[in-house]
Image (tube, rainbow, N blue to C red):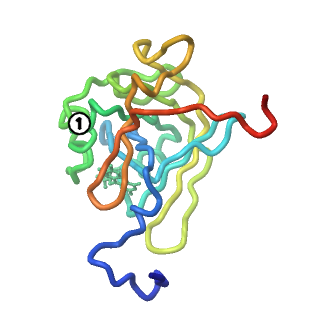
Amino acid sequence: MFYRPADGHGLPHNPFNAIIAPRPIGWISTRCSTGDNLAPYSFFNAVAYVPPQVMFASTGRKDSVRAIRETGVFAVNLVSEGLLHQMNASSAPLARGIDEFAVAGVTKAECETISCPRVLESPATLECCMTQVLQLAGKDNFVILGEVIGVHLRDEFLRDGRYDLRLVRPLARCGYRDYTVVGDQFALNRPDET
Ligand SMILES: Cc1cc2nc3c(=O)[nH]c(=O)nc-3n(C[C@H](O)[C@H](O)[C@H](O)COP(=O)(O)O)c2cc1C
């Protein structure tokens, strides 16, 4: 089949998210004048190595973006399989001022380099300084870019000096209400490598 998004897809549900899948989940924690905030974003990825930079996109005017505009910082907590239900609970549309750390039942820890909470149970957390907020086409679509200035790795996920995804078992978002878990991996050299 072929469709032009502007004309509709003709399917029971929009396949767009399923086409671009699986996506890592950035569990974004922020702090602002109304309290601490935690929410998952699967329009999330790394975008540069030096300095390390990440992005996530918000569709709609969300508390995370408001807090980041206010403070200029945020943390990205990565989500392992064991944090599935906590992550999902934190996505509920709660009144401003309600702390999603408590609602999700995760432990709040302090970041090292920024004034921001982080999820202690996360296998890895990236402490970020916001560098840009881009407004995209459409109503209330934003991309938040940040530079990573601190990295937490839980020691139990390090094996032989590597952050081992077979131990982490990262959770990833597919289309519809579907998820997957990375439980397998293989290595492949580049063509110019022996
Ligand atoms: C797995 C998952 C991924 C999500 N990804 C996004 C996303 O990429 N962008 C977005 O705007 N909302 C996304 N959401 C919805 C937000 O998490 C939800 O709107 C949340 O309430 C926003 O919280 P906030 O207003 O505290 O920032 C996602 C939800 C789930 C469960």
Give the x, y percent position of residue 4: 49, 84
Residue furthest out toward the right: 192
Relative image position of residue 143 (x, y in whole percent)? 53, 56
How many marks on residues? 1
Q: Which residue lies most toward the front here?
A: 194
Q: Which residue corresponds to mark 1?
A: 86
Q: Is residue 82 left or right of residue 122?
A: left
Q: Residue at x 37, y 50 (%)?
A: 173
Q: Residues within 10 Å of mark 1 (few under 14, many from 20)?
A: some
In the picture, measured across the screen, residue 148 lies left or right of residue 138, that is right
Q: Quadrant of the N terminus?
A: bottom left
Residue 21, given in percent of the width and then of the height, sits at: 44, 55
The local secondary structure at tag 1 comes to helix
75 or 180: nearer the eye?
A: 180
Which of the 4 image quadrants contains residue 128? top right
Q: Tag 1: residue type?
A: Gln
Residue at the image point whose x is 68% and y is 36% from the top: 49
- The C terminus: image quadrant: top right
